[in-house]
Amino acid sequence: MEITININGTDHTADVEPRRLLVDHIRTGAGLTGTHIGCDTTSCGVCTVLVDGTPVKSCTMLAVQADGREVTTVEGLKSADGLHPVQQAFSDEHGLQCGFCTPAMMLVGAALIDENPAPSDDEVRWAISGNLCRCTGYMNIVKAIQAAAAAASSNGDS
Amino acid sequence: MLPARFDYVAASSVEEAIAAKAEGGDEARILAGGQSLLPMMKLRFATPSKLVDINRIAGLDAIRSHNGHLHVGALVRHADIAASGAVSGAVASAAPWIADPLVRNLGTMCGSVAHCDPEGDWNSVLLATGAEVVAQGPSGRRTIDIGDFVQDFFTNSLAEDEMVVALHIPVPSGRSGGSYQKLERKVGDYATVGVATHLELADDGTISAAGVAMTSVAPINRKATDAEALLVGNAPSAELFAEAGEAAAAAADPRDDVRGSARWKRRVVAAFTQRALAAAAEQAQS
């Protein structure tokens, strides 16, 4: 069936089988490979994207379900002004090791900061509890999300 | 992994969804959050010939207190429940422990209840609180007691031309409380053991109604009826709750598996029942 999904601000129209998963559509259909496939069984969270601003596992949603909706992938975080605060903070705080879980962690972090401009350590850990980092680099991921929150609110104040 | 091929219908009304489901017979499934159904389809544990997507139906996402019960529509996500000010007792206690935050953003309470996975948390909460499932078919709506709705392992009592449109969870007018205690190896894992409790207190402070139900320790979510009977008519106390914990442990029928031995799980049931009753009583008394 024909679907149109707005991915990172651009409409993508395609004819897809109903059984095609959103993650496959993003990677193969739209060619955006920043969204990763890890466990493919709804456990690891590396396929996280934002659908209408809400983080979900794109391996557990059909592409047809996203018809007419807005999807943000890691490629959509950067704006004309440069890196998203969460991207800058992951770089500054060394919030990644192998980098495989990083796109998902940054999207969850960005969605959290949108809702909660100053998340506590516990709130960050709770928010990323559906995302696995096999390098176990959680300490710096938490630090990076908190640094991003601080940077985003100081930008907002100025 | 791709699911097997299926026909897809995005219904725009409950009537349309029911008609499409009926047409597909027992091989048609309703797609709400999809957080249990899609993984099962990818692993080919489920191969429905037709999916009826209800996500575009307006009006199914309401969560509100109404006529002595909490009404939870078919598109209310676990995250909506966790964030709602309208929920209390065992429902409020269980919501943050369903799956993980990403799954909670899509998965629905009604879908989880209809799925009837014995390792699912919500059916224990509904059994403890005495909830009803609202089903709609071509001739209208009917309410089904949760005890009659949950028939067996992954089996509910819906007819082929019916879908779950809401849940009605009693909200007692007097003093009441409830709790859900869950042991999980990690966030997102199924419960090793889960216990839901619900207590209502009479004017003299004794227990006038009690619900205790267990997750992951029987072939289906199971009410601990002996424990409930022990509680009613008595004043809340640590001794009474310990006794009820032993009765619940005796009613559990756990299996040895990767999450632990059956013997140990029984002890967890006893301890969690005791804790969940104490938490429920504290809420009811405050």
Image (cartoon, grey):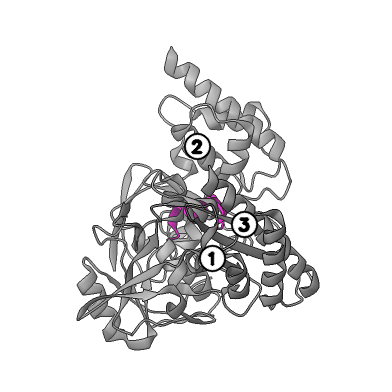
Residue at the front extreme? Answer: B204
* Chain part drawn in magenta: B95-108
Using the rendered view, name the quadrant where residue B157 is placed: bottom left
Q: Nearer the viewer, mark 1 or mark 2?
A: 1
Q: Determine the secondary structure under disc 3.
A: helix
Q: Is residue B183 magenta?
A: no
Q: Amino acid at mark 3?
A: Leu
Where does residue A4 sit, x and y in percent of width and height? 29, 56
Reading the image, the residue beneath label 3 is B277
Q: Dot 3 surroundings within 10 Å: few (below 14), some, or many (20 or more)?
A: many
Quadrant of the snapshot with the N terminus of chain B: bottom right
- Where B21 falls versus B187 (above or below)? below
Where does residue B183 sit, x and y in percent of width and height? 68, 59
- Where A74 falls versus B58 (above or below)? above
Reading the image, the residue beneath label 2 is A112
Q: Are marks 1 and 3 on the same chain?
A: yes
Q: Nearer the viewer, residue B92 or B2?
A: B92
Chain for numbered disc 2: A
Q: Is residue B103 magenta?
A: yes
Residue A31 in view here = no
Q: Amino acid at mark 2?
A: Leu
Question: How much space separates mark 1 and mark 3, taking CA atoms?
Answer: 9 Å
Q: Determine the secondary structure under disc 2.
A: helix
Q: Nearer the viewer, residue A143 or A90?
A: A143
- Where B112 falls versus B19 (above or below)? above
